[in-house]
Image (cartoon, rainbow, N blue to C red):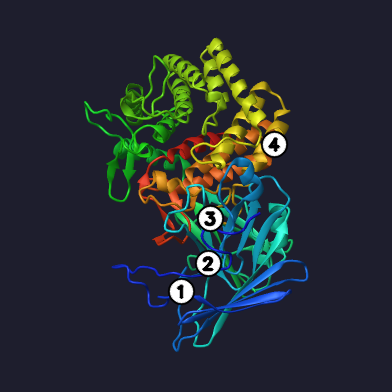
Amino acid sequence: MNWRGQTHEWGELFTRHRRTAYNWTPTWNFNEPLRLDYFRESINDSESIYKCSRLQVSVKRSFTGTGRFKESYIFTNLSDSELFCRKGEVGIYTTFCDEYTSALISQTTKCHAHVWCGENASWVNALRQGISDKNLGLVLTEGSINCYSIDRDNQKLATATRGNIILSPKIPPLLPGESYTISWELFEHSGTEAFKQIIAKENNLFDISAGLYTIFNSENFEFNFPYADGTKITCDGKDIPYTVKNNRIYVMYPPHKFGEHKFIIEQNGKHTHICMYNADNFEELVKKRLYYIADKQQYHRKGSHLDGAYLIYDTKDDYLYFNNENSDHNASRERLGMGLAMTKYLQTHNDPKLMDSLSEYVNFVLREFVDTETGEVFNTVGKNPNAKRLYNAPWAMTFMAELFELTGDEKYLEYLHRITDHYYSLGGEKFYPNGFSPKDIISAFKKGGKDDYAKSAMENFKTHVNNMLKVGLDYPAHEVIYEQTIVTPAVTMICDMGIMLNDYDYVQKVDAHHKTLERFSGMQPDYRLNGIAIRYWDDYWFGKAALFGDTLPHYWSCLSARSDNDFYLLSGDEKYKHAAENCIRNCLCLFFRDGGASCAYVYPFCVDDHDGEFYDDWANDQDFALYFAMQILDKN
């Protein structure tokens, strides 16, 4: 695999010129770059020294006796006063080649870099994007790392390129002439489980295990790790009790607030943390979100194309937003997630207010972008035929199936049949539609007694799935060349076919697709990362900040949860039932206690010169996660 970065080299030193609150003046610490001052290499090792007026960094590289590659970075204060470094102000480029080209090239020459900045227990699990027993691991052996940033060369890199990853050490205040060292070692490993076993040998804090990272208010946080004398655990300044069993520490702790609980763990002079989340009460979360949509995100204006539409809402500035020039900001497409969530909830709840809201929305959908006579699904309001997009129709099919489930009105099955036929007349059998389940469509037809429609749809679905089986792992490019939601349709649709045919052989047929999908998902001890697929372009297209950079979580991780759940239903393997629930719960941090929501959380500390670690202000397309949560959590 090629570890050379797009615009930077592995091991380059980084200093940030962060803007102040009022202007763009660089901070005083570093107003000049670190420049190479000295270099030496031999067959066994090398040393490079970089300097600026206030800081020197000596970089030493060598191979260990076990064949690992070791790097040490020694930071020395050259000034005549104490040097305090802000979080993320100094960093090291670790240019893992995390980007997407064609599917097979990505699977063999690119990686998913799962980064964990856990202070003294930091690591990177760089999994080859395709199934492989040759992967790269990085484990911190000295010092502390507390954040990472992404350098996208001022947003100039391509959509399918994650950007240069910068790991930032947590440098304590340095007296004049004082130094601080971080060291890490890189090694080959056969996969995630082997990686976990390897790093667990470094110290106890690399071996943290937890059940569900997101809980509801009646549940407890639970995690464990190896025992050592003097271990201390705190959360919000409170000491957290624990028990010891079989030489492991076990924590079972009820939430004391809504939202994030960051547990700080201290053991043998080492520090790390685990981040978990209290989503409060799921029933209340859903209800508040849907009332928020009805009260704030539905547009009312007679005579307008948008009358009855669910629109983007700016949760910070409190206003609706629509832009027909940017289809990711229009009232169609992914905004159907709001209608799906509303419909799914009302199937089990009698709520006149929400039913009235949904009725207005259905009128909007059928008036403006779904042609009930031809089955064509348009990209925007006014049934504008200028743009064609094959993602839209499968969502509309799902919406019609859910409306029939809610109302029992057979007209929705007629619309569903026409949309299905029209979609496949356009070549839909070669497309990879995300958020779509054939078995849900067949179930609706059969429940409504439309066996002929079910038979017709089933023939199309069989052709569709057979095409996926023929293509194998060489997935066709879609709106992004290769990514998680090109793999999830293959997993879900192949599983669905196996479930509908009651054919266990489909477990083997889908196995390679599912293993490929698993490699996208993180395993870090943080609810925003654990089970969450790497994505890094969604905020740019769907968010107010319009920023490329890691969106962790992003709501489309719900499709990995859906695929895991389908794989469980097909295979019976309970492990994937748990994986599905863990993933979908972790998506719920995108929904707020007042009913507001966010289309993405930008996880890195910084992306280029932009501050990260924030929820985007726009409630846009995240309600697909709520829709799938109602399905998965109900089934589990």
- State the CA–CA distance, disc 2 to disc 1: 22 Å
Q: Position of residue 256 (x, y in %)?
A: 47, 57
- State the CA–CA distance, disc 3 to disc 4: 31 Å
Mark whose residue sits in front, 2 or 1:
1
- Residue 511, labelled with which disc? 4
Label 2: which residue? Answer: 146
Q: Is residue 308 above or below residue 112?
A: above
Q: Earlier in the sequence, mark 3 or mark 1?
A: 1
- State the CA–CA distance, disc 2 to disc 3: 17 Å
- State the CA–CA distance, disc 1 to disc 4: 49 Å
Q: Position of residue 318 (x, y in %)?
A: 28, 47
Mark whose residue sits in front, 2 or 3:
2
Label 1: which residue? Answer: 33
Q: Quadrant of residue 231?
A: bottom right
Can the viewer see residue 143 in this picture? yes
- State the CA–CA distance, disc 3 to disc 1: 38 Å
Q: Earlier in the sequence, mark 2 or mark 1?
A: 1
Mark whose residue sits in front, 3 or 1:
1
Q: Residue at x 27, y 28 (%)?
A: 305
Secondary structure of residue under mark 4: helix
Secondary structure of residue under mark 1: loop
Please state if 199 lies on the left or on the right of 456 as rendered. Answer: right
- State the CA–CA distance, disc 2 to disc 4: 36 Å
Q: Earlier in the sequence, mark 3 or mark 4?
A: 3
Q: Residue at x 73, y 74 (%)?
A: 44
Q: Residue at x 63, y 77 (%)?
A: 47
Q: Earlier in the sequence, mark 2 or mark 3?
A: 2
